[in-house]
Amino acid sequence: MKINDYNFAGKKAIVRVDFNVPLDENGNITDDTRIRGALPTLKKILDDGGALIIMSHMGKPKGKVNMKYSLGQIRDAVAKALGRDVKFAPDCADASEAAAELKPGEVLLLENLRFHPEEEGKPVGIEKTDPGYDAAKKEMKARQKDFSKKLASYADVYVNDAFGTAHRKHASTAVIADYFQPDQKMLGFLMDKEVQAVDNILSDIKRPFTAIMGGSKVSTKIGIIENLMDKVDNLILCGGMTYTFAKAQGGKIGDSLCEEDKLDLALDIIKKAKEKGVNLVLGTDCIAADSFSNDAKTMVCPANDIPDGWQGLDAGPATRAAFTEVILPAKTILWNGPAGVFEFDNFTAGSRAIAEAIVEATNHGAFSLVGGGDSVACVNKFGLADSVSYVSTGGGALLEAIEGKVLPGVAAIKGE
């Protein structure tokens, strides 16, 4: 069922959103992108004359109540975004009465799903190596079904609009769908757009296709790098992983970040790129600093010849120029991960150069998808989020989708 084709009048809809928004020490939201992203789905239900039950996780409370992660902190922000009062259920597993009393046009926000271990479905207080683990896992799966059935009982319709958690087979993202008929469960607008954006990248490739993979560790990106090798024309690897590649090739990297146990993997990636005819672009120079600080002393030096006591924290001018040259002619672009420690204002130049090149390519007809928390934070910081084709809300989910994995949250709706 497509959400556009459904009339929610007189129905109660339970919607899984991703309101895992960043908060400051006073509980104030520092980036409301995820709340704004869910508004089209939430407002469609309310405008149709439906009643709305919102559920989400926040943080990693590990199956225990921890008020640091209470969704009560964002209740006012959600109410302001929706332009109406939002009721609050202090326990998501004990909200039957509040849900039953909900009238058309009213909104109920459930407390953090992850205050209950059943949401994630992992046995608590027992290791995988312990003798009773299999029995504990089986018991938890049964409890997860009961928890999912309870959540489902609150509503007539289930909508999943949380792409950021679509790669998890959790109670609220996948198991709950078993308790709704095919015409009573659907993807929200945001989720549908995310799935379509991934499809554009993987199935409707206009060439050249350039992928930019950044971040600190090659180990966290190996699956996606290997999958992209069969699809891309150009692969830019940047950020902290630059120095693992530099060292693997015999370079001197000072105190830069390096995965010592992944040097062979780095060489293997270089070899595979050659075999598959992929243009692999690595940084040749960097902005090195004498400490991990915004106020550190800096110098430009080769990425494979960094003095002891110094560490590479951003892409250098020659590297930025090389990246730009590869990005500008691209017709399909994927960006995941920054080129440097962009959180420090003095080390944003590499990431900014990538972002600006992507925007220029987009203006000339490229389809550009920016995904992953840090890349999204980059384009937001530079004020360029509206100048690329699509900004994905899903970090891990986006990566797994591009790796070619089936996302449980999508499969549960589509019946795959």
Image (cartoon, grey):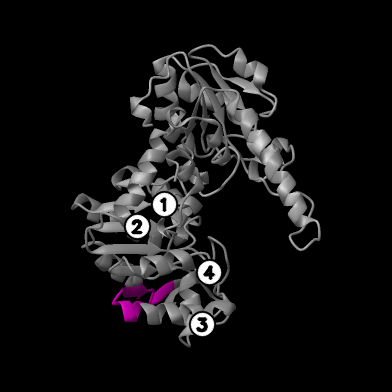
Find disc 1 in the rendering and name its residue.
371
Tell me the magenta residue range: 273-286
Rendering coords of residue 251 (x, y %) = 47, 85
What residue is shown at x 43% (from left), y 22% (from top)?
A: 45
Q: Marks 1 and 2, Cα distance to the nearest angstrom?
A: 8 Å
Residue 219's tag is: 4
Amino acid type, mark 4 = Ser
Residue type at tag 1: Gly
Q: Compared with residue 196, is residue 176 higher up or lower down, i.e. above or below?
A: above
Q: Residue at x 45, y 73 (%)?
A: 242
Cα gap from disc 2 to disc 4, whole angstroms: 19 Å
The numbered mark, 4 or 1, whose residue comes first in the sequence reads: 4
Identify the element where label 3 is drawn: helix
Q: Secondary structure at mark 4?
A: loop
Local packing at callout 2 (Cα closer than 10 Å; few below 14, some 14-19, many 20+) is many
Q: Is residue 196 visible?
A: yes
Question: Would you name the residue on which mark 2 appears?
Answer: 334
Magenta stretch: includes residue 277: yes
Asked which secondary structure carries label 2, the reply is strand
The numbered mark, 1 or 2, whose residue comes first in the sequence reads 2
Q: Quick one: label 1, few (<14), some, or many (20+) residues within 10 Å?
A: many
* 101 or 134: nearer the viewer: 134
